[in-house]
Image (tube, rainbow, N blue to C red):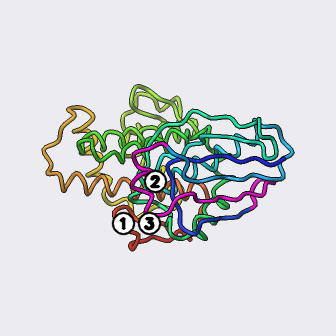
Amino acid sequence: MAFKFGLTNIFFQGNKISFDLAGYSNVLVCRISKSGIAEARWKNVITADLYVEGAEDDQVQVKKHAQVIATLLSFALDSHCCLTSMQEIGNDYSTRNLPSRGSFIQLNPVIDADDSDALKVFLSTSYSGYNELHETRSLNVVIELFNLAENNEQPIELRLATIFILLENLKATYATQKKYHRDNATYYKTLKDKGNRKKGLGFKKILREMFSCIGMKGETLSDLNSVVILRNDIIHTALSEKLFDEQYKIYTDCRNLIAEYILRLLSFKGSFNLYNGKGIKKKTIE
């Protein structure tokens, strides 16, 4: 069987990307040009098609496959990529419209939208990692929050609050995966440690451990103190006395930390864009 899925809210250069994944032959076709992006931002229109061939599974499994690709594209291209239609090719009566929402953002994509080869590598290397971890680490929620924070019509405090909730989610799923024991807002590695404040793991300690476990060390984690201080200000008072530029710097640092963490978690190898680097400043994961 072969299926065609309509995707909304994404753009990539090169018109067509072909790749084999999970036993399927996949082709992504971009429907719009850069000149059409402005219109797409304000309308929930199909901007790309995904063709999936060689499918022996039922429609439910194929749809799950397409949903994973859409979610990964949401993260890579920093936009709300949604499945908006599904059709069995050769069956004109099988077209179904799927509920979709979100908006076209794509201002600071993690993976270059102008580099179709890089996007292909990202999808090919991250797919199995996502399927393995998406439930235990709530990756669909993480990616949703990652994009929700990019609503620049919100005050910076709300954007930061969304990022801090995202970090809390990553912290909680990491601690659960490690089978740590929770007591209010503190985690302990063993039950006998409960109540021993010196052995308690708070927000910063778990984040540092979580990042370090996948190779993020040294300068990468040097600004966690300022992240935690601002997080406490905003979570407890909804305001901060820091200037906008100082808050935005921390927001930028957090997005870079989160992007690198997710990429490493998915076993991605290659270069990704640093936030607000205009596609010029990159970092390589080896």
Mark 2 or mark 1: name the one nearer the start of the chain: 2
Residue drawn 12% across and 44% down?
Answer: 241
Q: Residue placed at 44% from the left, 50% from the top?
A: 40
Name the element at disc 2. Answer: loop
**SS for dot 1:** helix
Do the residues under discs 2 and 3 have CB atoms within 8 angstroms? no
| Residue identified by numbered label 3 | 273
Nearer-the-camera pick, 202 or 70 = 70
Residue 82 at x, y percent in the picture: 56, 43
Asked if the magenta segment contains residue 38, the reply would be yes
Is label 2 or label 1 in front? 2
Compared with 73, 145 (above or below) is above
User: What mark, if any, has residue 254 been given in the picture?
Assistant: none
- The answer to whether mark 2 and mark 1 are in CB contact below 8 A is no
- For the C terminus, give its image quadrant: bottom right
Residue that numbered label 1 is attached to: 219
Q: Where is residue 90 in the image (x, y as percent from the top left)?
A: 82, 46
For mark 2, does the 10 Å Cα neighbourhood hold few (<14), some (14 to 19), or many (20 or more) residues?
many
Q: Magenta stretch: give its range.
A: 20-44
Query: Residue 78: which disc?
Result: 2
Q: In which quarter of the image is residue 155?
A: top left
State which mark lies toward you, 1 or 3. Answer: 3
Q: Where 53 sits versus 137, above or below?
A: below
Residue pictured at 41% horizontal, 69% vertical: 279
Q: How far apart are marks 2 and 1 (CA)?
A: 25 Å
**Label 2 – label 3 distance at C-alpha:** 11 Å
Q: How crowded is mark 3: few (under 14 residues within 10 Å), some or many (20 or more)?
A: many
